Image: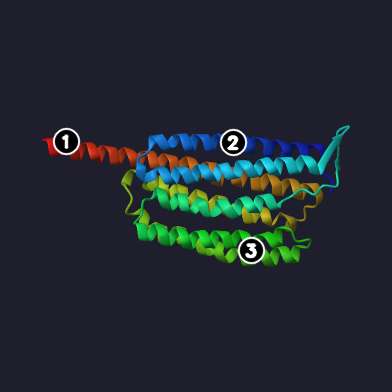
Amino acid sequence: MDLSLGQYTLVYNAFSFTLIAMAAATAFLWFGRSQVTHSYKTALAISGLVTAIAAYHYFRIFNSWEAAYSVRNNVIAATGFAYNDAYRYVDWLLTVPLLLIELILVMKLSRAETISRSWSLGIAAALMIALGYPGEIAADNATRAIWGAISTVPFVYIVWSLFKGLGESIGRQPENVRGMIRSARLLTFASWGFYPLVYMLPFTGLSGGAVTTGVQIGYTLADIISKIGLGILVYNIAVRKSEDEREGARHAAATVHA
């Protein structure tokens, strides 16, 4: 596979940036647990776990990229070690269900609804990733298209659940966070919708290094948005709802003493 020096360096730097960004987000989210009430600590713990898992896998992805190519006299050559795209899918298999669960947890639904939605959406997310992997590693576009179409089925179910099921629950949220929860839902949908577009790049007529670069940069950008972007939104929702809870507790205490 032919890669130019610019293509190799662009992907190399993107992996390096994303690795440190995921690590920094993990520290921010885990330290941020001290800013929220007990009700939302689990949501932030899971949000930080998502970026921690991603940071580890970007470390492995970065090393795999380095091992797959050598740079000599500004010329990129394959070393014979295959770049391992499986790291991405292992990451997604773990983190995509958790992304949905952290959104559900920060909404503080009833215990029964939280468990039900976490299981149904988590399983659908895992199926979506597992069904997409055979197409990702396929040598021909026909096989890639078949598995991509099959993996769309659980994706459609997830989108329906986000906008139908969780949409009804948003109306029961405090008014000052409803807009942020809608934004988190839209961000999830938009970033997840970007992955299939990247997946289909081999069908655009691009080839060789252009496809490799486009796929790696596209997936990396989507990861940053879906993991770090959603994590920051979940943090802000948790902080705002915690402030409301503390204010409510202070008001209740003042009423009792009065």
Instruction: Judge left or right: residue 183 versus residue 247.
Output: right
Residue 196, relative to residue 54: is it above or below? below
Count neighbours of disc 1 (C-alpha within 10 A) and say few if under 14, some if 14 to 19, many if 20 or more.
few
Q: Pick the residue in front: 254 or 171.
A: 254
Q: Secondary structure at mark 3?
A: helix
For the C terminus, the image quarter is top left
Q: Residue at x 44, y 46 (%)?
A: 43
Q: Amino acid at mark 1?
A: Ala
Q: Amino acid at mark 3?
A: Leu
Instruction: Judge left or right: residue 178 versus residue 96.
Output: left
Residue 223, relative to residue 254: is it above or below? below
Q: Residue at x 61, y 34 (%)?
A: 20
Which label sits on residue 21?
A: 2
Q: Amino acid at mark 2?
A: Ala
Residue at the disc numbered 3: 131
Count neighbours of disc 3 (C-alpha within 10 A) and say few if under 14, some if 14 to 19, many if 20 or more.
some
> Do labels 1 and 3 touch, CB within 8 Å?
no
Q: CA distance from mark 1 to mark 3?
A: 56 Å
Residue at the disc numbered 1: 254
Which label sits on residue 223?
A: none
